[in-house]
Image: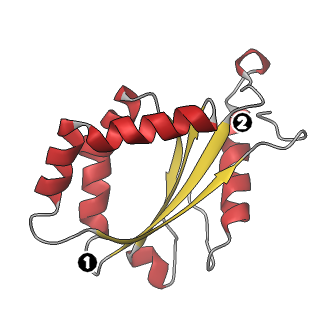
Amino acid sequence: MRTLLHGTALLGVAMAALAAWGAAVSAADAPSAEKVYELRIYKTNPGKLDALHARFRAYTCPLFQKHGVELVGFWTPTEGAEAHDTLYYLIAFPSVAAQKATWAAFRSDPAWIKAKAESEKDGVLVKQVLTKNLKATDYSPIH
């Protein structure tokens, strides 16, 4: 799914991502009221978006899964300057407490530390990270 993103339209991206993901979730799999979704936007340094995609494919996504991060989706803008330097993604955690513990464990994982260092041997990939925690509304198809 490709989404046309303008500026920091975080809510629109989150709603589209949640709706797409929700279509695949059955009522029996519905998340608890505590579940938190985290929208993350990475702005890369010039020419580093492909390297960031490679790092996510090879290291970040498998390590997220190892640490229990629920992967909802990943998107890049289809046009404009952001098409060359921006990654949007949505992940989920059972609760804010689980989110904090998971991020602490992930960041201290020796495999992540090594992967990050190796992927940035020719320069830092990400220059800015924006994050926003979201919760499902009572009318959300995944609530």
Which corner quadrant of the image does residue 126 belong to?
bottom left
Disc on the earlier residue, 2 or 1? 2
Q: Which residue is mark 1?
A: 47
Secondary structure, mark 1, is loop
Which corner quadrant of the image does residue 4 belong to?
bottom right
Q: Report how far apart the C-alphas of labels 2 and 1 lie in the structure.
A: 34 Å
Image label count: 2
Position of residue 20 measured from the top left corner of the image (x, y, whole percent) = 68, 44
Which corner quadrant of the image does residue 54 belong to?
bottom left
* Residue at image coords 30%, 78%: 45
Q: Using the rendered image of the protein, determine whether residue 120 is visible from the camera's viewpoint.
A: yes
Q: Is residue 40 left or right of residue 94?
A: left
Q: Is residue 24 left or right of residue 101?
A: right
Secondary structure, mark 2, is helix
What amino acid type is highlighted by mark number 2?
Gly
Please, is residue 104 above or below residue 40 in the view? above
